[in-house]
Image (cartoon, helix red, strand yellow):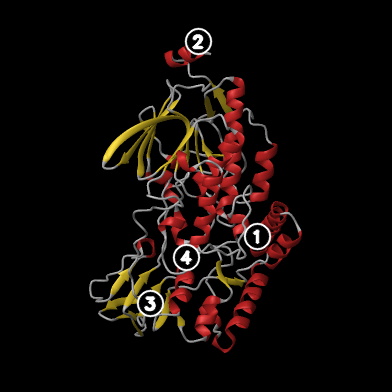
Amino acid sequence: MSLTACDHDVLIVGAGISGIGMAAHLEMMCPHRSYAVLERRSDLGGTWDLFRYPGIRSDSDMHTLGFKFEPWKHEKSIADGPAILDYLHRIVDQRGIRDKITYDSKVIAADWRSDEACWHVTYEQGGKRATTTANWLYLGTGYYDYDDPYDAGFDLSQFEGQVIHPQFWPKDLDYSGKRVVVVGSGATAVTIVPAMSDRAAKVTMLQRTPTWMFSRPAKDGIANTLRKYLPEELAYRITRWKNVLLQDVAFKRARSAPEKVKEALHKRIKNSLGDRYDAATWTPPYNPWDQRLCLVPDDDLFTAIREDKAEVVTGNIAAFEKDAVRLTDGRRIPADIVVTATGLKLAVAGKIAVSQDGAPVEFSERFYYKGCMFSNLPNFSVVFGYLNASWTLRADINSEFVCKVLNHMEAIGANVADPALPEDHGLVEEDLFDFSSGYIQRSKHIMPKSAVSLPWRLNQDYRFDRKALATSPIDDGVLKFDRAATSTGQQLEAAE
């Protein structure tokens, strides 16, 4: 029997990778728990349903972006958006999750009521507001603003062509024979430029500063070979750990020996571009992994440049003219279409108005607890993935941890789990995001706090986190368990 009188034991917000991962873990680890999923969009997939720009694909391998419990079966490990959506749809169908998802339901507020041990969640559906309650609230809402992307402040009033933002790509955009300028040099731009180059007259990636890039095959030869000779799940586990290890080693190598890594990255790009190589175009003013590296699968961007279908221009924008972009050094780049791939804007908790007994929760004043909960905020968890590895790695361990907490609560008869932090905690804060990426730096003021050590730290080391969460006790003396002493609780006790 449920330990609360809430509508649901667990309410999951978001049916993307994070939300589906939590639902799957509940099915596996807490099959008797009731749960529901509210998704603001009309279909599942989150990021992979939202972004529809040409070439949309993963920027990390699907053996780590995929879940640890569900093997990735496609030949390509750098997968396109439709393949990732197929993977997520297969999971929700095979694991009985689909019927638990309610679409077109945008959560706008959530208030924790201590006397009831329930979250009161308000959402909009069909133009009307509704409320549901849950003992535990799990946010799989991602990390960026779905409604308002970052505005770089360009004055586009004189430009007479089309202006497109990747977050709102039109279905009927015809760019055949058009001159396209993609403003930006991040993962989105690096994906769009080669994808548009086959049909456009010319695609120019206009960068203010270069980005570190590395190329690799879209197919993982080791993974595909292992699948031929080993059981599918074993082959997947081996490949997953191989890629986790390689990611970890590459990141730490970049931090410890940046000049060596720079040399290796330049060598790869030079080999791919041949006589089209220009060091200045590919040399950022920061070290590798001070920002996330951009993946170029199968050399697609470099191939488009070699074939004169695409180019990379470095410069600062002076103005957008009626049919061109003019740079501060006087150069003009002709344009029929401008794509503003200028970055994301971060959002905390999906912009949901979270409150605690009616008082607004300021996440910038809370510390992370074990990378998924927050100080003095009961029965609440989120996913904020790794900046130096695949998002799903954190989603997996967070979901597993929360399920362990739920099972412990049931075993001891508790309906409240609160990461208790006293006012005189004396914690030493750490720069949570020591990455120079613009979207990170612009959003530091809204982000939760992180201490120098666990459990109050949002770590950036998956292997360390996985071991720590697997071996540390749930009842660690920090996470306080209780039973809400209310008339509702007393009625439940009597019923039991």
Amino acid type at image mark 1? Gln
Q: Residue at x 44, y 58 (%)?
A: 439
Report the front residue among 460 and 68. 68
Q: Earlier in the sequence, mark 4 or mark 1?
A: 4
130 lies left or right of 210: left
- Mark 2 to mark 4 CA distance (whole Å): 55 Å
Tell me the tag on residue 56: 4
Looking at the image, is 431 positioned above or below residue 328? Answer: above
**Residue labelled with disc 3:** 181
- Mark 4 to mark 1 CA distance (whole Å): 22 Å
Q: Earlier in the sequence, mark 1 or mark 2?
A: 1
Q: Earlier in the sequence, mark 2 or mark 4?
A: 4
**Residue labelled with disc 2:** 494
Q: Position of residue 230 (x, y in %)?
A: 75, 57
Tell me the tag on residue 341: none
* Label 2 packing within 10 angstroms: few (<14), some (14-19), many (20+): few
Report the front residue among 93 and 341. 93
Mark 4 vs mark 1, foreground winner is 4
- Mark 4 to mark 3 CA distance (whole Å): 18 Å
Mark 1 vs mark 2, foreground winner is 2
**Residue labelled with disc 1:** 247
- Mark 3 to mark 1 CA distance (whole Å): 32 Å
Amino acid type at image mark 4? Ile
Q: Residue at x 45, y 61 (%)?
A: 438
Q: Secondary structure at mark 1?
A: helix
